[in-house]
């Protein structure tokens, strides 16, 4: 025989608004002692205030309530506890932000992304680092530039510029590349990069980087890129998608090299590359063909030397 059950005096569920909860906390009240008058047994702010007035209660100081018990010290990680400095927005940064915002709102952007196997390239770069001739040792960035140039030659439809309604193929390729200095981006340009060898590209890239760090850039070092490459590997960014700045119709961004396992269960290195392009000018098929060509060149770096 089932025993008879008695109903509990404690409500099974009680709605309590944030204002009522704050008063309960400040006066250290048990919500079950306060009569509720709200719909569905909800405890209202006025219910708590009436209870406080009828019992002539005062707020409990923070060091006298149950919450004043000694709490264990919480040790935050260095990342959480370190301080940050707000950087002032200079006029140059504001102008750049306005340009990017206008471009994103007026140019139809599309993106194609590929994860490229760069295991052979990494081994080649490491061999170059062991070479006694430091000026000859190529970097991944130099190989990326060379792969972009060969892909542009193979798919010239991507090597275009647009000014208003006019679209034209650039007779030369001026590669814009970013250099990070004092946590800020600076875009510099390798002019007529399509006429350079891999060794010449590597030397020119290093020369421009040194100019950025020494503050000796001239206007000609920064103007009129026809195709840009954004390298975010030094900032430990794995993937990104950039905004176009006219008259350029395409740019490539790539992130940090990461380790993974291939389909054959072999450890390999890959990099994620994203082509941003103006889909009113460049066909999706041409963009995909360009990215596949770029990936093939980067995957077989012997073709880039």
Image (cartoon, rainbow, N blue to C red):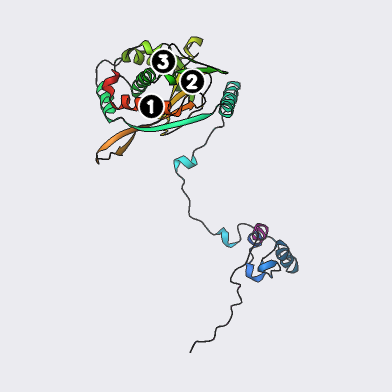
Q: Is residue 207 above or below residue 256?
A: above
Q: Nearer the viewer, residue 147 or 130?
A: 147
Cα distance in 3D space between marks 3 and 1: 35 Å
Extent of the magenta region: 3-23
Query: x, y (%) of residue 15?
Result: 63, 64
Residue drawn where x is 46% and y is 40% of the image:
79
Q: Which residue is mark 2?
A: 186
Q: Nearer the viewer, residue 84 or 224?
A: 224
Query: x, y (%) of residue 41?
Result: 66, 69
| Disc nearer the start of the sequence (3/2) | 2
Q: SS of the residue at dot 1?
A: helix
Residue drawn where x is 42% and y is 28% of the image:
285
| Disc nearer the start of the sequence (3/1) | 3
Q: Which residue is mark 1?
A: 289
Q: SS of the residue at dot 3?
A: helix
Q: Nearer the viewer, mark 1 or mark 2?
A: 1
Q: Is residue 13 above or below residue 254?
A: below
Q: Nearer the viewer, mark 3 or mark 1?
A: 1
Cα distance in 3D space between marks 1 and 2: 30 Å
Tell whether position 181 is magenta: no
Mark 3 surroundings within 10 Å by alpha-carbon count, few (fewer than 14), some (14 through 19), many (20 or more): some
Answer with the quarter of the image where residue 39 lies: bottom right
Query: x, y (%) of residue 96?
Result: 57, 23
Q: Which residue is mark 3?
A: 210
Tell whether position 16 is magenta: yes
Mark 2 surroundings within 10 Å by alpha-carbon count, few (fewer than 14), some (14 through 19), many (20 or more): some
Cα distance in 3D space between marks 3 and 2: 12 Å
């Amino acid at each position: 025989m089932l025993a008879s059950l008695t109903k509990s005096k404690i409500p099974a569920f009680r709605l309590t608004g944030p204002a009522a909860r704050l008063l309960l906390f400040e006066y250290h009240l048990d919500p079950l002692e306060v009569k509720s008058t709200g719909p569905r047994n909800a405890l209202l702010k006025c219910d708590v205030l009436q209870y406080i007035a009828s019992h002539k209660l005062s707020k409990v100081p923070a060091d006298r309530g149950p919450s004043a018990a000694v709490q264990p010290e919480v040790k935050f990680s260095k990342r959480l506890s370190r301080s940050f400095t707000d950087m002032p927005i200079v006029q140059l940064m504001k102008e750049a932000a306005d340009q990017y915002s206008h471009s994103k709102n007026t140019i139809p952007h599309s993106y194609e992304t590929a994860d490229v196997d760069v295991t052979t390239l990494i081994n080649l770069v490491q061999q170059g680092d062991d070479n006694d001739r430091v000026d000859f040792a190529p970097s991944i960035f130099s190989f990326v530039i060379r792969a972009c140039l060969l892909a542009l030659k193979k798919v010239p439809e991507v090597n275009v510029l647009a000014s208003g309604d006019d679209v034209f193929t650039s007779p030369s390729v001026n590669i814009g590349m970013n250099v990070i200095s004092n946590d800020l981006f600076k875009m510099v340009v390798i002019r007529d990069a399509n006429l350079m060898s891999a060794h010449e590209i590597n030397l020119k890239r290093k020369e421009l980087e040194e100019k950025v760090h020494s503050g000796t850039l001239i206007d000609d070092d920064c103007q009129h890129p026809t195709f840009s490459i954004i390298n975010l590997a030094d900032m430990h960014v794995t993937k990104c998608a950039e905004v176009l700045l006219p008259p350029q119709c395409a740019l490539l961004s790539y992130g940090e090299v990461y380790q993974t396992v291939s389909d054959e269960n072999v450890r390999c290195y890959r990099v994620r590359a994203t082509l941003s392009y103006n889909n009113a000018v460049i066909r999706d098929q041409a963009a995909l063909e360009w990215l596949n060509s770029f990936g093939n060149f980067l995957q077989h770096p012997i073709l880039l030397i």
